[in-house]
Amino acid sequence: MVEFVLEVEELHTYIGQHHILQGVTLRARRDAVTVLLGRNGAGKTTTMRSIIGLLHPARGAIRFEGAPIDRLAPYEIARLGVGFVPEGQGIFATLTVDENLRVAMHREDAPSRERLRRMLVLFPDLERFRHARAGTLSGGQKQMLAIARAFVNPQRLLLIDEPSKGLAPIVVEHLIGALRAVKHETTVVLVEQNFAMAEALADDFYLVDDGRTVHEGPMAALAGDAALKKKYLGI
Amino acid sequence: MKRAAPVLIVLALALLPLLGMEPRVYLTLTVAGLAMGMLIFLVASGLTLIFGLMDVLNFAHGALFSWGAYAGFGAVLLLDRRAGWIESPSVALNALALLAAVAAAALVALVLGVALERVIVRPVYGQHMFQILITLGASIVLEELIRIVWGPNDQVMPVPISFQGSWDLLDVIVLRVPVVAIGLGLAVYVGLQLLLHRTRVGLIVRAGVESGEMVQVMGHNIYRYFTAVFALGSALAAVGGLMWAIFRQSVSPGMGGEQLIFAFIVVIIGGLGSVTGSLIGALMVGLSYNYVAFLLPKAALGVNMALMVLVLLVRPTGLFGASR
């Protein structure tokens, strides 16, 4: 078994004419939570979208379980067992909560329905509003739905982009609890601006600045390094 | 309540002309308007799904309408000459002839739709300017092909005897073809609703209308759904074209282009991507066109434009459009 579920090496990605990623490197250890930190515009979301195949990198390598995936279509990458929770949740507002969960299944079979039932136990709000339109949910509930949606498939890697964005502090607390409950089930790569949340969940960190990886290490080391935090995160 | 409002508006609009005409004339116009609305709905429903899901402005949709009419025309001619099903007094044989024509139209359009999506449309996803140019080009080529095969002139569409003429209900003359068109339109609406709301394919298509990107990262090959929806939309346009030909008892190579204007108006009124919206919009357009054409013939098309402008002023996303 490969020690690293995901390996990203010297990734260069353009959006139009803009050279957004200029050498991002990242490795996600099996069953650990790896957090991607950096200022706004550093290239975190672009990195995530390159991994899932929505953007095609110009140079560099992306390997999942040792095999290259950077030439695959998003749906092929998803079918390998890579889940993606985008910035802003990406839920289908006109569909019901139940429909959102069912459309997320690669295949609507018994094991998937069993996983869906577990998610409804884990997130009672989703059970309560199961047949309501997802657009009527609160911001926190939408985020719960987005995460539950990722877990109706047998995921080997989960990419979560800024889950705390726009949520009230009390809701973020709740979200941290929920992610703690599910994080042992898979390998997670998390983009997070909320340092407290990153600290509460992550095992390893990567620091991205101006489209490049500038630092990496165990999360505990960063938490104690005031100079590094100030330089790259402004905190 | 909010969703019932457009239905109420249609009802009010439909009753308004009663003030200015005899009830018998009114009923005849209403049946004609509903039939015209249903035929436009067949064209617009495909257009709205293609636009909603694939974000493609398909100007070749009108050509598929014409191709459907000619495919059905060919089938009817063949059945008439070889089997005599059209002139036969048997209702069953007449109905069978009609079904065969519908099947021929749908089949030709399905094949053509798959080919168009794969070859013409796929390279230009996300580029509206190129979509307009290339689908407009395709529609010109398709229309010219009809001229080469069938000639440039209008031709008389034979109508099975059982569907000719009218029923006389309490002194009100009800033409048979419009009633068939209304029935077919309703059946297609119900079928589309079942497909979209009761099947997994429909669920994925509805999700794709909101965000194709999210559907892809959930492991669904959205391009397969694009092809299927494009082919289905083409088939609906073709059946609409055939019914229109029977309604007017004639076919002409340019017939699709004229209908495309109505279909675009309807798609905009109903809201991009909404099948229910295009049904309501199509009925509004069909009814108002017929009433106004009777009362004030020159204003008929203008009223439809005015209707569209009015709807857009009140609801910029259309009656049933999701704001996105």
Image (spheres, rainbow, N blue to C red):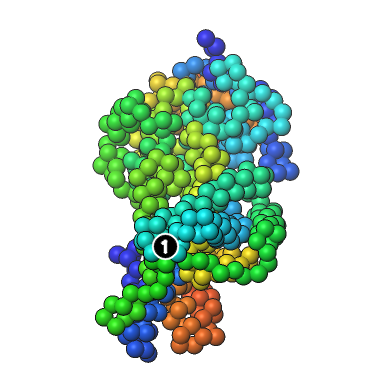
Q: Is residue B65 left or right of residue B273?
A: right
Residue B222: horizontal and vertical position, in percent?
Answer: 53, 40
Dot 1 falls on a residue whose secondary structure is loop
Q: Taking B220 as reference, is B148 left or right?
A: right
Residue B320 position (above or below residue B50): below
- In this rendered view, identify the residue nearer to me: B95 or B45: B95
Q: In the image, what residue occupies the spot 31% across and 39% down?
A: A126
> Which amino acid, mark 1?
Ser
* Looking at the image, residue A116 lies above or below residue A143: above
The residue sitting at the right extreme is A17
Instruction: Determine which quarter of the picture holds residue B149.
Output: bottom right
Instruction: Name the chain letter of the residue that bears numbered label 1.
Output: B
- Which residue sits at x=56%, y=40%? B223
Whole-percent x and y of residue A185?
Answer: 40, 21
**What residue lies at 37% left-to-right and 74% top-to-bottom?**
B166
Please state which of residues B84 and B324 is positioned toward the viewer in this rendering.
Answer: B84
Q: Position of residue A1 (x, y in %)?
A: 52, 9
Q: Quadrant of residue B250?
A: bottom right
Disc 1: which residue:
B88
For residue A227, say whether it is visible: no
State the image coordinates of residue B19 (x, y, percent, origin top left). 34, 88
Q: Residue at x 32, y 85 (%)?
A: B23
Quarter holding the N terminus of chain B? bottom left
Local crowd at mark 1 within 10 Å, few (<14), some, or many (≥20)? some
